[in-house]
Amino acid sequence: MSCITFLTSGSLRGPAHGCGTPDYPPSVSRVVNGEDARPYSWPWQVRQSRTYRVVMGEYDLTKRRAASRSGVWRRSLFTLTGMTTACPVGNNDIAMIKLASPVVLNDKVQPSCVPESGEVAPHDDPCYVTGWGRIYSGGPLASAPCGRPQRCSSSVWWGGGGTVNTTMICGGGDIRSGCHGDSGGPLNCRGRDVQGVTSFVSSRGCNTLMKPTVFTRTSSFTKWISDLSILHTN
């Protein structure tokens, strides 16, 4: 199962909602090893299972009645050169989906914020991984403070050889990380910015010491997101 993040770019309609401002504030008081998130508190996250069941907010988009009511269908998928589905570790592990019609915003469906191009989240910036991973070793909601890139790519962490590079960001590593089922989901920092998109975790399992979750760094692709959104506005 993978997750999709609903970004600000694109055609939107509905009440005036700002990005990254959920009507249902998330509960982040207990975060170690994950906890169940408050319903609708991360309204920019979409779930896609291996059976292609897509859920967005209150809508199950595979049910014709719900899809018709929400008016949301996928039309196109865009990826960057260098992305590969044959190996979970690689550059440009990011994609954009163009919907067939505008999204109707409400208190359960809202966009996230995209960081400025080139922005790097500060070390130990409080961030949260959200998704449908296993609670006992990752979870729907787990803290994952940002780590220094130099430490993350060191031989005792993820090792050399370009496994972790400047287009990526690490979160956790001190027995806190994402888990299987969180892939594609957002790394939410400072309450609103999606600083990363979950790319891969250690083959040793979730919450492995010195093996933090590695995310695609969103700010490395902000211009690509913006340019693609403008190109495919209609």
Image (cartoon, rainbow, N blue to C red):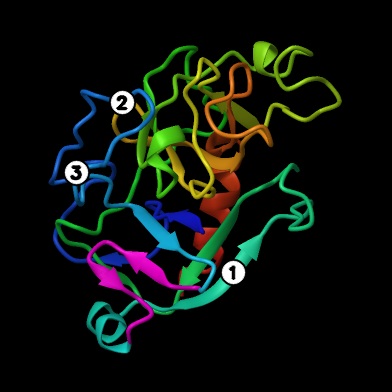
Other-residue count near label 3 (Cα within 10 Å), few / some / many at <14 / 14–19 / ≥20: some
In this view, the residue in front, 180 or 185, is 180
User: Cα distance, mark 3 to mark 2?
Assistant: 12 Å
**What residue is pinned by disc 1?**
77
User: Cα distance, mark 2 to mark 1?
Assistant: 34 Å
Question: Is mark 1 in CB contact (under 8 Å) with mark 3?
Answer: no
Question: Which of label 2 and label 1 is nearer to you?
Answer: 2
Place residue 11 in its image quadrant. Answer: bottom left
Question: Which of label 1 and label 3 is nearer to you?
Answer: 3
**What residue is pinned by disc 3?**
38
Residue 31 got which mark? 2
- Is residue 227 part of the magenta span, yes or no? no
* Mark 1 or 3, nearer chain start: 3
Give the residue drawn at x 54%, y 39%: 218
Which SS class for mark 2?
loop
Give the residue drawn at x 76%, y 55%: 84
Expressed as whole percent of the image width and height from the top left, the position of residue 46 reads: 38, 59
* Mark 2 or 1, nearer chain start: 2
Amino acid type at image mark 2: Val
Is 76 drawn above or below residue 221 in the view shown? Answer: below
Is 88 drawn above or below residue 151 in the view shown? Answer: below
Magenta highlight range? 52-63
Place residue 72 in its image quadrant. Answer: bottom left
Give the residue drawn at x 58%, y 24%: 208
Is 134 drawn above or below residue 173 in the view shown? Answer: below
Expressed as whole percent of the image width and height from the top left, the position of residue 150 reads: 69, 12
